[in-house]
Image: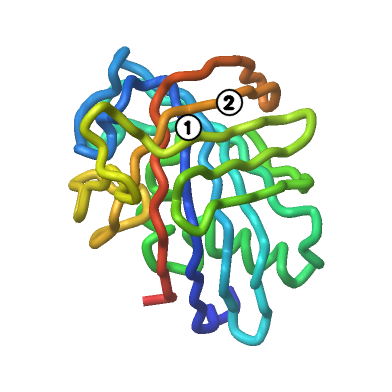
Amino acid sequence: MAEVPSWHLAGDWFDVCKCAVPCPCTFAQPPTEGDCDGVLVWHINEGNFGDVSLDGLNFAALAWFEGNIWDEDTKANMGFLLDARADEGQQEAMQAIFSGQAGGWPASFAAKLGDMLGMEPAQIEFEIADDLTSWRAESPGRFKASAEALEGPTSVPGKRTQVHDPPGSEVGPGSVATYGTVTADEVDAFGFKWTRTGRSSKHMAFDWSGPD
């Protein structure tokens, strides 16, 4: 295998899932209903794999698992969507990173993969409010995922409901999870199909590097 170049990715990640707010997975606990399915989306604000730029590209996964995802034996069945705007070199770089072959935190994430349901190029739209009031992503015909920041009767204007250093962070140690309520969670791809609202969503920034 060719030597893996130095790489770095920094950007925004969020998910929408079937769990009640707040999603127990972020606290390293079993899902609300014992199993969970949902959409995970990554937007790369700045990134490179050696001399290959990955700025502005998106990546998504549709997943299902049963039990506590942080238990050693728990695996998730996942199908992946890779930004159709990526050229051949960018596709190879993103596959190397997100498959875990290039090391770094994604290698830990990839270790949770059960059945690989496929990886397809797709149009992926991504938007996030600067003040984290909302976030959304869509791949036409495959999924639609959006959420608004969690609010309640004692919310402080301009403040977000956040957990610092959550023990079950999907993007790795040292993260900050901003909680939201799902406004759209529609999936029809890789054998998955569901439509729902009102469940849990969370946003986290990520900053990864490798191969170490």
Q: Quadrant of residue 65?
A: top left
Q: Position of residue 125 (x, y in %)?
A: 71, 47
Choose the circle earlier in sequence order: 2 or 1: 1
User: Residue at 62% across / 50% down in the picture?
Assistant: 127
Amino acid found under the numbered disc labelled 2: Ala
Q: Residues within 10 Å of mark 2 (few under 14, many from 20)?
A: many
Seen in the image, is 61 located left or right of residue 52? left
Amino acid found under the numbered disc labelled 1: Val
Q: Give the number of the disc on residue 16.
A: 1
Q: Which label sits in the foreground, 2 or 1? A: 2
Q: Give the number of the disc on residue 131.
A: none
The N terminus, quarter of image: bottom right
Q: Position of residue 85 (x, y in %)?
A: 80, 60
Seen in the image, is 103 located left or right of residue 167? right
Q: Residue furthest front?
A: 157
Vertically, is 170 above or below 145?
below
Residues at badges 2 and 1 in contact (C-beta under 8 Å)? yes
State the SS at label 1: strand
